[in-house]
Amino acid sequence: MLSTLAKILLTSTAIAPVGFTYAWVAWFDGEKTFASLAIAASLSLVLVCIWMLRYAKKNLERFNFTVATVEAADRENMGFLLLG
């Protein structure tokens, strides 16, 4: 089981794509300093995510899981992603 800090770090890595988007917009608005900082922060979040997943793969317990049924969930979110 991951600690609370690890869960917060993994959750915060979901912000990385938003940071890359802000960096792109800032770069074309002429704010190269903010763009560089956003890229650096986003890359560090991606590296933290990769490190955490590799650590979890090596050190956490494993157990068998059998799937009984599968249902499609969050159809509204999928439609939003497809339209965006």
Image (cartoon, helix red, strand yellow):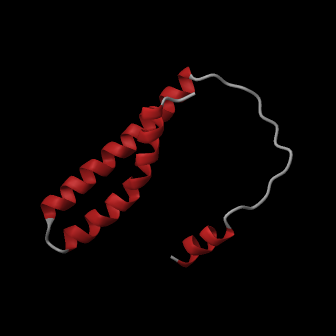
**Taking 20 as reference, is 1 above or below it?**
above
Q: Position of residue 79 (x, y in %)?
A: 62, 74
Left or right: where does residue 24 sit relative to residue 80?
Answer: left
Q: Where is residue 27 in the image (x, y as percent from the top left)?
A: 20, 68
Residue in the foreground of this view, choosing between 80 and 54: 80
Point 44% across, 52% down: residue: 14
Q: Position of residue 77 (x, y in %)?
A: 60, 68
**Taking 45 as reference, is 54 above or below it?**
above
Point 54% across, 23% down: residue: 58
**Quadrant of the rendered structure where residue 76 is?**
bottom right
**Quadrant of the rendered structure where residue 51 is?**
top left
Q: Count the numbered circles shown.
A: 0
Kindly give the residue lying farthest to the right in the view shown.
68
Kindly give the residue lying farthest to the front in the view shown.
4
Left or right: where does residue 30 sit relative to residue 74?
Answer: left
Q: Where is residue 50 in the image (x, y as percent from the top left)?
A: 44, 38
Q: Quadrant of the N terminus?
A: top right
Left or right: where does residue 16 sit relative to residue 83?
Answer: left
Point 38% across, 38% down: residue: 48
Kindly give the residue lying farthest to the bottom in the view shown.
83
